[in-house]
Amino acid sequence: MIRTSSFKRSEDGNIAMLFGLTLPLFLLFAGGAVDFSRHNAVRADLIESLDAAGLAIAQLDAANGPEIRSLTEAERTEYLKDFGRDFFDENFSHDGIVEDLEVDFDIDNLTITPRASGRLKTLLLGVADRVFQGSSAFTYISIDSDTQITRAASGDTEVALILDTTGSMASDNRIEDLKAAAKEFVDVLIREDQTDFYSKVAIVPYGGSVKVGSHALAARGPIAAPKSITAINKNSRVTITAPDHGFTDGAFVRISGVNGMTQVNNTGENVYVVRNATANTFQIRHVNESSGASTGSWVDSSGWSTYTNGGSIYCTTPGCQYNFFLSDSGDDWRLFQITDCVSERTGVDAYTDQSVAASKVGRVYARLDNPYVCPPSEVAGLTSDKEDLNDTIDDLAANGNTGGHIGIAWGWYTVSPNFSDLFPGDSAPAAYDNDEVAKSVVIMTDGEYNSSYCNGVVSQTSTSGSGGSSDKINCDAPNGHSYDQALALCDAMKDQGIVVYTVGFKIVDSVNARNMMRQCATSPAHEYLAEDGAALKRHFAAIAQAISQLHVSR
């Protein structure tokens, strides 16, 4: 009894029992502090290495060097992923202590998302597992992370897409490939949030010339108004009355819209030679196109219907509604009509971005039955509206010859502050000395430039692919060949600090086109060659990425 009571009174064993019960908790708290500290350090290294690898991938992709240009889309993605894994391995300093480490990258044209997962073996928490007799709950801590690299501009950006929409683009699905590539460019470059910085794109389609639509009057100046007819007599030598008509003997005029004596509207192209002009009247002769335009017979109206009213007389020289000219063939007189397209500027401002208020650009005259030199797609000024840009791209149509230098000029004009009167409001380009704005142009072609102009008509010095000799005027282009004009414009743009990218589409066999792409580009790194639609789309995305800045968005 005494021993039993003594045992009950002893407290030495209670301490041992309490220690045994609290030891696992102590190990959990102490081990957790140590191992979770290690976990945070390793994860911080993991995130930093993932960010670095993702940025490296984006920069390599944007550079689009020769090592990846020839790859298919799938091959390119795997190449970039392998590059990213190698880059990660070189930077991650805890590789040996993270087990089952897996690193991968989700890559698209807007974002790069690096992902990593693995498990970290604990130093002290694992002891708790042994205390709990075989539990493995504390032996490993999962470690994973993802981050995201957004290809988005960190400054204001103005870019002109100068797009070849000539007749050759109608073949081999090229125009559809171009539309897909241009939309990809817009999708990559134009950010949804334009609050802090804006990104804007202009679309400049070109064929034989550039269509400026409602801007034509301001760009190339007005055209001479027609004179109104008040009377036409019936005589073997018809006399036309038009007060203050202003025409002189030998002038070529076109007559249309006459009522009653409609026969005068239906003679050839209705072009006549003025004779015996007074202040208010003149007589007319037919045009003899084979032996000299002014030697035709007198117009005899004696057997025609009686004039009732109406009728207009148009001059037919450059600056008029019509242009009557001797063709390159030398024995064919042609009548072309003014269009809302424009050609190159001549004179001292040929290779400048001087305002059109001070120096007009060239006119474009086209055949009445087929204005192929005037492309159907119109230039669109700078905008951040993706829907509008995509609608413009959807409307692109292939047609005509190749006056690419005119496209280059208007690409420059759309980002030039000197053209803010022509492209006002949100489309107005920023000043050149605004350091917050980066200006670029992207010149795309699928072949050689071939068409230059004289007096608004394709010149006789234009080369193969520019149309037949009967549709060319018998004079040389004052500025020379389209190829030489393009190079001069590229040099002038680069002197203004505009970055020039070039994209040749299926031009492997075209020496002149390849040379021009090389010489126009700001540097060899700014020149791209696409052998198919997939490559064209990839290159456009790469250029958009190169123009944009890169940042870690999460």
Image: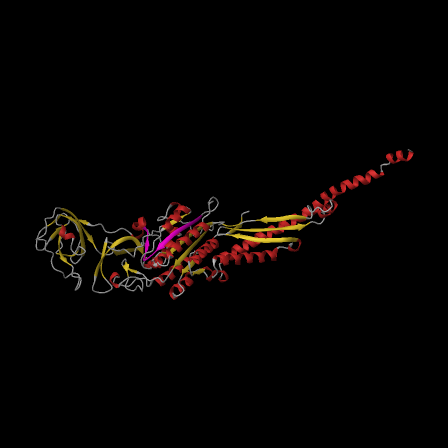
Residue 104 rendering spot, x and y as whole percentages: 56, 53
Q: Is residue 280 visible?
A: no
Q: Which residues are magenta?
A: 199-212
In the image, farthest residue toward the right: 2
Q: Quadrant of the N terminus?
A: top right
Q: How is the image coloured?
A: secondary structure
> Seen in the image, is 213 located left or right of residue 548?
left
Give whichever of 541, 449 is nearer the camera. 541
Give whichever of 400, 519 is nearer the camera. 400
Q: Please identify the dominant SS of the magenta region.
A: strand
> Seen in the image, is 389 located left or right of residue 73?
left
Answer above or below: position of 487 versus 183: below
> Seen in the image, is 283 located left or right of residue 431?
left
Residue 404 rendering spot, x and y as whole percentages: 35, 59
Q: Toward which corner of the image does residue 292 lie, by quadrant?
A: bottom left
Instruction: Report the number of discs.
Output: 0
> Seen in the image, is 309 located left or right of residue 378?
left
In the image, farthest residue toward the front: 1
Q: Is residue 80 magenta?
A: no
Identity of the residue drawn at 71% across and 48% down: 126
Residue 349 rendering spot, x and y as whole percentages: 34, 57
Residue 365 rendering spot, x and y as whole percentages: 26, 56
Q: Is residue 551 visible?
A: yes
